[in-house]
Each structure stands twice: as structure tokens, then as C-alpha cells.
Image (tube, grey):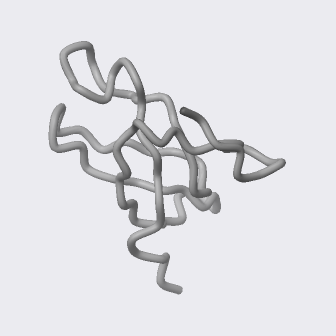
Amino acid sequence: MKIVVSEAPPYFLDVTAPVIGCDEQVIDGQVVWRFRCRHCRCDHIHGPGDGHREAHCEPGSPYHAGGYNLTLATPARN
């Protein structure tokens, strides 16, 4: 089930998808949210903002089919 949470991307949360805590980082002047995937052991980088994302995982990861919801765990430090 999807719940609309914003008029800007990401627009919704998927209540059936897991929640992943991200670190906020600035890369080449752009704010991004990053987390290390425990399933594919890769860093996943997304635009900032709480909400649902399509997974960057390879097939075989439980995130591949349904994605995940991101939330901020650690804000960027200046």
C-alpha cells in the first residue's frame, strides 16, 4: 500500500517496503543520501528526501522487486 507524503519527489511511502537509514553526504556540491546495502554489499546513492525508492540492487536481493523507503539517519557535517 502506498501513501502519498509529498508533492515533490519522492512522492510516497510504501508501507510494505522496508525502511533504510541513510547518511547524508555532499558529493560534487550535490546533497545525496547513501547507505551500504547489506544484501549486495554496494553503496546505494539516491537524491535526498524521505520516501520510497526503486532499488539499485541486483536480482536476488529482497529489495530488487519492491524497493525500499529511505529515511535520514545521519545528517551531513559542514
Which residue appears farthest toward the front when viewing the image? 1
Residue at 47%, 60% in the rendered image? 71
Question: How far across and down, in percent of the image, does residue 30 sit?
Answer: 63, 58
Which residue appears farthest toward the right when viewing the image? 7
- Rendered image quadrant of residue 3: top right
| Residue placed most toward the observer, 63 or 46 | 63
Residue at 18%, 16% in the rendered image? 60
Residue at 47%, 42% in the rendered image? 15
| Residue placed most toward the observer, 57 or 6 | 6
- Rendered image quadrant of residue 59: top left
Residue 5 as seen in the image, left or right of residue 51: right
Question: How far across and down, in percent of the image, does residue 34 sit?
Answer: 40, 54
- Rendered image quadrant of residue 32: bottom right
Question: How far across and down, in percent of the image, does residue 4 sit?
Answer: 71, 44
Which residue appears farthest toward the top when viewing the image? 59
17 lies above or below 33: above
Identify the image quadrant of the N terminus: top right
| Image label count | 0
Residue 9 as seen in the image, left or right of residue 20: right
32 lies above or below 67: below
Which residue appears farthest toward the bottom when viewing the image? 78
Residue 12 as seen in the image, left or right of residue 42: right
Residue at 42%, 30% in the rendered image? 67
Question: How far across and down, in percent of the image, does residue 43 sit?
Answer: 30, 44
